[in-house]
Each structure stands twice: as C-alpha cells, then as structure tokens.
Amino acid sequence: MTMTEPIKVIDADTHIIEPYDLWTSRVSVKKWGDKVPHVRWDDRAQEELWFAGDHVIGSGAGAAAAGWSEAPPKHAPKMELIDPVSWRPEDRLRLMDDYGIYAQILYPNVAGFGAGRFVEVSDGNGELALELIRAYNDYLVDFAAADRKRFVPIMAVPFWDLDIAIAEMERSRSLGHKGLIFSQAPDAFGQPQLGDPHWDRLWAAAQEMELSVNFHIGGGDMSGVNLLHPSSGPAANFASFPVTFWLTNAKTIATLIGGGICHRFPDLKFVSVESGVGWMPFLTEGLDWMWQECRVTDEHPEYDLLPSEYFKRQIYGCFWFEQGPMLDTVLETLGPDNVLYETDFPHPTSMSPGPASQAVKPKDFIADRLGHLPHETLQKILHDNAASIYHLD
C-alpha cells in the first residue's frame, strides 16, 4: 500500500459497544430503579438483553459482530464471548493499527441513532432521559481518553427541549465532542418533523459551535427491520431491510435542501452516515430536475443555488463496501469533496474480516479496490474531508 501509507485514514463511522454498567454506574438506580438501562439474561431469547423498566432495548452483544463465527443475524449471546477489541479502547487501538486506521468517529448502539430511544424508555420523563444522555456523552469522553487524537466522540442531544439541547451541546463540545447525532424523523418521537423551522435554533447553535449534524441510518421509525414475510427467513430479511434504511437518508437530504435549511445555515455541515453514496448522484440530479421543473425559485427567490450545489457545499456521505464503476461514477459526478470512508466496525457486515465474512482488512481494501484512484482523491476521501468536518489534526 505504498501510495496510501502516508494517509492517516479516518474511519467516519464506527460504533462503541456500551459496557453493561454504563448507565447503572452513572445514573442513580436508587432514584430511578430498573428504568436505568441494564443487562440481564433472557430465557426466551437465549441471550443477554438490554432492558429499561418494561422496555427491551436490544441485544447485549449483538452489535459486536466483528470476527464472530456465524453470519448475521446470528450473533454472540453474551458479551464474554465477543472479542474485547469491540469494547476495550486499548485493544481497539491495536486493531486500528492492524487495519490501517488512524482515527475513528464514534457512534452508539444502545442509545439509538438520534437519542429517540431514551425518550421511549423514560416513558416521557425528561429528567431521566436527560440523565441517560448525559451519562452516554460523558462515557464517550472517557472512552476517547485512551487517545483523544484517534477517538472522536459524537454527542447525543436531548432534542425534546431546545434550551436543554443547546446547553448539552455546549457542555459536550467543551468536553471534546466534535459533532452531534440527530434523528431523521423527530416526529416519530412526538416532536416537529425535521423540516419544521422549530429546529432553526438548534441548527443555528450547531453552526455557531462548528458542530456537524450527523444523520445515522435507523434514527427514526425502526419498524422496517421486519421487511419480509417470516416465510422468507431471517437471513434474507437481514440482508434486505438495511438497503431501505440507507435510501431513507435520501428523504433527509431532500428535506435539508428543499426545506431551506442548507440555505439558511450555509456553514453547517451535514453527514449521511452508514448510508452508502452510490445513490447520491441520482438524488442530486433528480432534485435539480424537479427544482427547475417546479420553478422553486419563483416561490423562493432567495434560494440562489441548485440542490446539487447546496449538496456539494454542505452535505457528505459515507461508504464502506462500494468500489469499482459505482464509486468511480460518484467521484466523477459529485467530486471527491463530499465522500467519506467508513468501516462500520464492529457491526454486522462491517469492513471486519472474520470466519463468516467476505470482508478484508480496510488497508487491503483501500490498496486493492481503491488504489487506482489519484492520490489527491484518496487523501480527500480517506482523511481530509473528515478532518475538516470534525476539526481534527
């Protein structure tokens, strides 16, 4: 990998595997009882599950699929069976060296991809939900302390109250967080829809604080995980529904542009996380066509750019498995300035080699599948774009 060795690869989407005592050690169990997220063995599921009161949040070890011996959706039933590289920062740093990854942007599992899960499990109690979010944000800072240049925390936000949300953004930013994760569908949690001007105060605050807004797939209604009829089988279902989640971020991008959010906040950066990028040229070309056909500027003369131009100025997408003509077309049509590389470690079907995966080490993928790209292009998609968005060295 001679050509790419000097590049400090920034992995734009990885996930922490939350330790079982994350919330019970930081939030008062005496005060809140079993509403504080915790893990216990479930006989029916035959695995360790996260619980909060009567709510089942998810699998204890299911998200830590890297290196597991069985193909998804099969997964480890207990945390003790997974490789510590998934949850112990010192071990993860060694794996990053082996994979050829310099830095990782950190996203959650249990907390949900937009903090909406905490609204659900707190049964409407804003005080409890806020404590859960603050505990998670603090834990990320502690995790990143193993190497603050290589671990990049992205904060959860108590979006149900703008005053509290902005205060938490300020607090977490002061602790080292480099962006925020936000739901594509806050209306799924009883809040105004994403395009509502209600959110302008939050966008303005994020812009002023130079915090990127990151839309990780699966941050809204998760009912789509059961896409297929049960007769199709769990493997076929697990292989099918994620694609629909990836494409859901097209709705998010259309909202950011069509709703005037990009126009009103020209310095704010938005990232479509774990969505792939192959569909983005079609999206931007389609938006441009419809924009002009519908004479949007007659309705909004203040809009001085085409959708594709707003996109190129402010919106980014992350890829991990795409390669060859598909990726080449994206880089040719959109250019390399809006593309980030991720591994999705340690999720199922991430760029994590193992006995049940076709994946190769990221450094080998980069050398073998991306090595034909100009060095300047590789420098941007592997490092510079992410370094700029997240203000990294």
Image: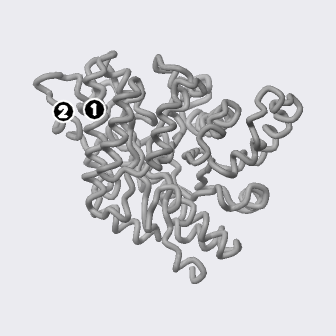
Residue 259 visible, this angle: yes
User: Given the image, on which type of amino acid does mark 1 rest?
Assistant: Leu
Q: Position of residue 80 (x, y in %)?
A: 25, 48
Label 1 SS: helix
**Cα distance between the residues tagged 1 and 2:** 7 Å
Q: Position of residue 309 (x, y in %)?
A: 74, 48
Label 2 SS: loop
Residue 243 visible, this angle: no
Residue 36 horizontal side relative to residue 158, left or right: left
Say the numbered circle drawn on residue 27. Answer: 2
Q: What quarter of the picture does the C terminus occupy?
A: bottom left
Q: Decide which of 154, 236 is in the foreground and name it.
A: 154
Residue 344 horizontal side relative to residue 52, left or right: right
Residue at the image point whose x is 49% and y is 63% from the top: 10
**The image quarter in which residue 373 lies:** bottom right
Residue at the image point whose x is 82% and y is 40% from the top: 288
Which residue is labeled 1 in the image? 132
**The image quarter in which residue 180 lies:** top left
